[in-house]
Amino acid sequence: MRRVAIIGCGQTKHGRRTDVNQAEMVSEAVWNAIDDAGIGIEDIEAFAVGNMQGFGGIAHPDLIFAEYIGAVGKPMQRVATGGTVGGSVAHLGYYMVASGMYDVVLATAWEKHSDSAEPGATTGLLHVAFANLSYMFKLGMDLRSFAIMGLAGAAAGISAYQAAQYLFRSGCKIEHYDMVAAKARRNAAKNKYAHLRWPNCKPEDIAKTEMLIWPMRFGHVCPASDGASAVIFASEDAVKKFGIKEVAWILSVAAFADEENDQGESYQGTGVLDYSEQIGCVLSAKKAYERAGIENPRKEVDMAEIYSPFPHQELMFSERLGFFDEGTAWKALEEGVTEIDGDFPITPSGGVNATNAIGSSGLQRVLECALQIMNKAEEHQVPKDVRIAVAHAWGGQTQFNTVTVLSDKPKRW
């Protein structure tokens, strides 16, 4: 396996992007990444792409926008793993270079939820949903699974169960969820690309929002964002060839999956009863740290970008990733440890709770870690030196986890 670095990062402004179509939106991120790297489109040898399949109402959107991003006639692979897809796209792009197949690969991921609001897109999604439901019932999906996935609101419904289970598991309170959500809005206010930007947001501001499904308030919920991100992976030889000085090296990647958390005992496996357990994240982190040569993540890692559409997940996953002991993340939150200027900043970009273009969100975590290492995060740059950073993504049917470890120095063999 060859050493691989990120040499360029690009993203779009997020929100409701009705000013562009999908192809135009993705091309914004792609060309921003190329400009950031200071190379030409002719230097890109292959593309890794992906989004949350079906959400944009277009089949094979990558084929539609290939011309917009200079991918015509070049190898392009698409991956789809639900909410984790951005993390999977990053891993795909990394392996395409690390394997020796290519020297320079551009990875891009996106989502355009505003297109899904159109009648045609919605009809397409319903076709997919009914097809999946018929498959589930054929295999014996139980009523508990149907209630969680259908009646409780899919990801938000599952996450409400998860948030409740984490409350009991950790001993934290709903007020700690308010604190995380407020921190996400404050950090996002420093990020010019973020969607929900709220300077000086306080936990009591979040606490005033209505309770949607206990213990989840309206202020805890991530937005449905339009947006795209792109990073350029390059081999060590290519980095030297281009003479690029500011890069972020990939130390390791790893991905594991639990059983489906939402399907019960009768559909595709045994199912997981405690949604906050997330053994897949624990295993992903363990393998990634082993490959990176990290023995104590809390001491050796400088910051992390965690995939947390809902605030309890920042606390939960920061424990599963080994940054805090079980049931102690909320104590670190109270002490200001995870603030942008804290001892261990978590998600200084504002993260998924403030900006969730689902397909892009996992790749954005990698992009944001790279920006921190290259000292390019502008107003949301953490004040301390970032030498090692961890990017996490979560999705599928709540069972997929990816972990990427980045550094300012290449890996020692």
Image: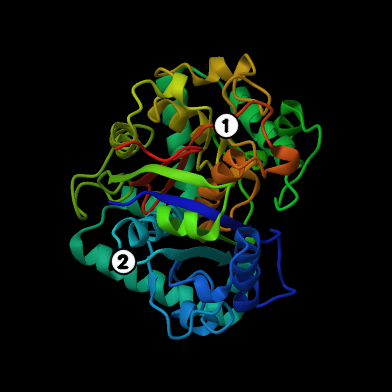
Q: Give the residue at x 50% y 43%.
A: 307
Q: Earlier in the sequence, mark 2 or mark 1?
A: 2
* Label 1: element kind: loop
Label 2: how many Cα within 10 Å (few below 14, some 14–19, many 20+): few
370 in relation to 102, above or below: above
The x, y position of residue 62, in whole percent, is 48, 77
Task: Specify the quadrant that holds the C terminus.
Answer: top left
The residue that disc 2 covers is 101
User: What is the number of the mark on residue 386?
Assistant: 1
* Label 2: element kind: loop
Q: Give the residue at x 46% y 50%.
A: 5
Label 1: how many Cα within 10 Å (few below 14, some 14–19, many 20+): many
Q: Give the residue at x 51% y 64%.
A: 108
178 in relation to 71, above or below: above
79 in relation to 315, above or below: below
Which quadrant of the view contains residue 380? top right
